[in-house]
Amino acid sequence: MILSLENWVSLKKLQREPASKNETADLLKNVDEFLTDSKSTTVSNNTRFNTAYNAALLLAKVALRACGYRTAGSGAHHFDLIWSLHETIGTPSDFSEKFQKFSKKRHQSSYDAIPVSDKELKGMIELAEDLYRRVRKWLKANHPELLEV
């Protein structure tokens, strides 16, 4: 069951806070850099995977911030950002399920030294690029004022 963002506020998972143009621009600049870096073949698959994952996570943050919320600093903020996409930009739940699987893989590669396969890397980069297109389109349609710097 997916809760509304206002329900997340009452559960102390989110806080209300307006977004700014400068913050949005800075986050999107980092996303652009991360997506570029994720395609660099001079570093390991693990590094590239983590960089693509970070790009996707920042995109979820951009959407949440554009809606006037931020995570409340709980230990589960990655989970919260991933699942907020359904409420912010309207991604289907299977998108968040796939993203959550990649989150688990990022944890395994970072903390358990489990290598990332070429297929997993390709899937994470594709998800991040797809989310980039979705968030940019959604921002243009719903919050164009945040794109005007």
Image (cartoon, rainbow, N blue to C red):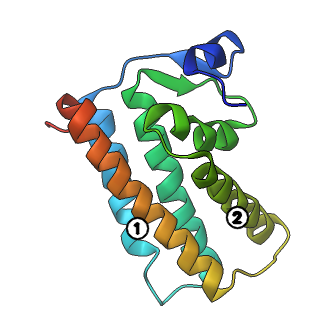
Q: Report the quarter where the C terminus lies.
A: top left
Q: Amino acid at mark 1?
A: Leu
Q: Which residue lies most toward the top here?
A: 10
- The answer to which quarter of the image holds residue 116 is bottom right
Q: Earlier in the sequence, mark 2 or mark 1?
A: 1
Q: Is residue 43 left or right of residue 132?
A: right
Front-lying residue, 90 or 111: 90
Q: Is residue 84 left or right of residue 138?
A: right
Q: Residue at x 59, y 78 (%)?
A: 121
Q: Report the quarter where the N terminus lies.
A: top right
**Residue 6 location (% of width, % of height):** 57, 14
Element under disc 1 = helix
Front-lying residue, 88 or 45: 88
Query: What residue is shown with label 1?
Result: 35
Q: From what the image shows, is residue 80 above or below residue 129?
A: above
- The answer to which quarter of the image holds residue 80 is top right
* Mark drawn on residue 106: 2
Element under disc 2 = helix
* Mark drawn on residue 52: none
- State the separation of the CA atoms marked 2 and 1: 16 Å
Q: Residue at x 67, y 9 (%)?
A: 10
Q: Is residue 144 left or right of residue 4?
A: left
Q: Residue at x 69, y 42 (%)?
A: 79
Q: Amino acid at mark 2?
A: Arg
